[in-house]
Amino acid sequence: MRTRVPGNLGEVIGFEDADCKEIERLHKACCDITEAHYPSSGKNAPVPTAQQLGADIAALGTVANAIKAKRDARKKAAKGGTL
């Protein structure tokens, strides 16, 4: 069974299109190499290099921090601060 990032993720407050696309890209990369998702035996997906894995981990941190920063800015604006 392959899990899927919901197609309406972009409708969630705090998720911009670029955030959604990056989450979907990272999710697909995980699904493509994880045995838990039962890839077909003919797929023979290559395992990422240490450099690619490190880049994907850094990208996940970047998108998570961007989403948190936007969420915090919205909270501040709702309390009377500026956005």
Image (cartoon, rainbow, N blue to C red):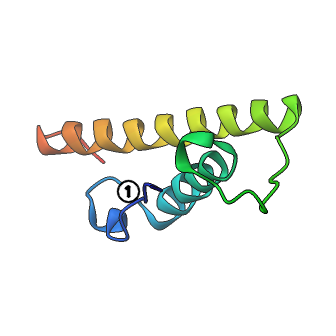
Q: Farthest left residue?
A: 79
Q: Is residue 62 above or below residue 5?
A: above
Seen from the viewer's position, the closer of residues 23 and 44 is 44
Seen from the viewer's position, the closer of residues 3 and 10 is 3
Q: Is residue 44 above or below residue 70?
A: below
Q: Position of residue 72 (x, y in %)?
A: 30, 35
Measuring 47% from the left and 67% from the top, which residue is drawn there? 17
Q: Position of residue 79 (x, y in %)?
A: 11, 37
**Is the N terminus in the top left, top right, bottom left or bottom right quadrant?**
bottom left
Seen from the viewer's position, the closer of residues 74 and 46 is 46
Q: Position of residue 46 (x, y in %)?
A: 85, 48
Measuring 64% from the left and 55% from the top, which residue is drawn there? 39
Seen from the viewer's position, the closer of residues 81 and 48 is 48
Dot 1: element: loop
Q: Decide if residue 48 is on the left or right side of residue 75.
A: right
Q: Position of residue 73 (x, y in %)?
A: 31, 40
Measuring 37% from the left and 70% from the top, which residue is drawn there? 7
Residue type at mark 1?
A: Phe
On the image, numbered disc 1 is attached to which residue?
A: 15
